[in-house]
Amino acid sequence: MKIGIISDTHFGDSTCKLLDNGKLSNIYTLLRNEIINFTRGSAKQPLDYLVLNGDTLDFSINSFDDSCRKARPFFAAIQQDNLAEKIILIPGNHDKQIWDVVEWERHVTMKMQQHNDPEEFTRTQPALIDFKNGLSLPGVSIKPGQNSPGGLFLEGFFPQGSNISIIVAYPNLYIKTPTDTYLVTHGHMLEPAWVLLSELMGDYPPIRQATNNNIGLHELEELNKPLTDLICSAIGQGGPVSDIFYKIEVEAKKGKTDEMKKLFDCICPKLDTLIELPWYAEGLDNAFLFALKKVALAIVEHGSSSRYDKEFYDKQSVRDRFTRFYKASCEQAQKMSLLSPPNQVIFGHTHEPIHGDSPKRVTVRELPHVDFNAIRNQELLLYNSGGWLQDVPGKSADIFFIDDNGNLTSVNIL
């Protein structure tokens, strides 16, 4: 079995390295050649699975239709170059809307087309690649007439006649080799914005009662959905409003706030007229808006982001979130009859590669708040596949390979 893993292609972002004026760039050629070299030099021996580990498309800054249109040449080339038999797509924070649409298709649209009642959303869908038993998706039935999962709308990325399946897993894929268990996940749940509501409200008595005081992967997705839906995709669907937010984002990465200042200067007077206070408190709204503007500008000018942060996994807050997420993943893996918790983890999200020959070592006992005995003293190897944007010079991406024996290697592109 041969597996390739990449992440953060960000089709829809104008700085995507894999595209040049709407066509595939020479960077794609480098990626294709590495895959062909790994499969013993022949495109007639494709990868069994190509894993796209999050942010394949970028809906947060671009419309759905344009992002999908820009991604189409990539998927068509995978078919034409015979690079993979199946694709496993793990949505990330910039394209989680894909998972939401899959949920609607499975539990609402398909059910109602058969005149049945909709089902409750599952919130998460793990996938397992077992070197002995192949691919499995717990709780997923294969459509009549098909021999593998898939068959959803995503396969419309390929030209007609394609036999490549796209299987969606969220947020985790597990790979069980003869010697190791890999956890492949995008990694956005280690950043505050994507778990903010569960961290703020997790100890509120009604939440504790509803979750039995155990926030697992299902709860991490469900509790945080009201906020993450807004920030992961809705901002990209506002036409000219989205263009302004994108410009603010680009400037923010450079520590600039010119566009944000212009926006505040425009909207603050309008907000002032909307806030009606008694005469003795008339100055409070102005003070509040002034403070809000100052705080927002300070966050942009002096704040930090996980993207391109080489020390991201060393921060204590990230370690705490990793502990909770890893514990929840181990519980999920145990329910899937895996013999041991994952001992190797492959992330994306930060766009900073951690190569296959130099993983980051983490011992679980060093992380706080661990109460899951099966993972005490577990040593983990952490990797990151980097990103495919050219917004910051000198940044690169890795493709990870797992060979027939379960050995992991990576190749740095550029």
Image (cartoon, helix red, strand yellow):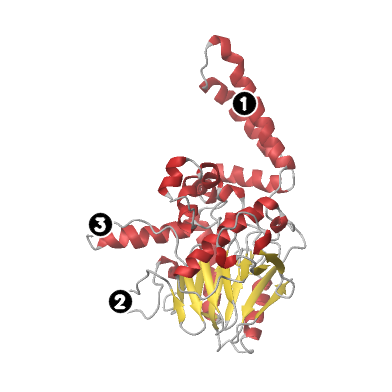
Residue 171 percent across, percent down from the top left: 51, 62
Badge 1 or badge 3: first in the primary sequence: 3
Residue placed most toward the observer, 24 or 254: 254
From this viewpoint, is residue 197 visible? yes
Residue beneath disc 1: 289
Residue 52 percent across, percent down from the top left: 56, 69
Contact, mark 3 vs mark 2 (Cβ under 8 Å) = no
Crowd tier of the residue under label 2, counting other residues whose Cα lies within 10 Å: few below 14, some 14–19, many 20 or above: few
Q: Residue at x 68, y 55 (%)?
A: 307
Residue placed most toward the observer, 73 or 288: 288
For mark 1, give the secondary structure: helix
Q: Residue at x 52, y 16 (%)?
A: 277
Q: Residue furthest right?
A: 394
Q: Which quarter of the rendering shows the C terminus?
A: bottom right
Mark 1 vs mark 3: give the one in front. 3
Residue beneath disc 3: 117
Residue beneath disc 2: 144
Residue 289 quadrant: top right
Residue type at mark 3 is: Asp
Residue placed most toward the observer, 41 or 48: 48
Q: Which quarter of the rendering shows the N terminus?
A: bottom right
For mark 2, give the secondary structure: loop
Residue placed most toward the observer, 326 or 138: 326
Mark pair 3, 2: CA separation: 20 Å
From this viewpoint, is residue 57 visible? no
Residue type at mark 2 is: Pro
Residue 369 percent across, percent down from the top left: 60, 54
Residue 269 quadrant: top right
In the displayed structure, would residue 31 be above or below residue 200? Answer: below
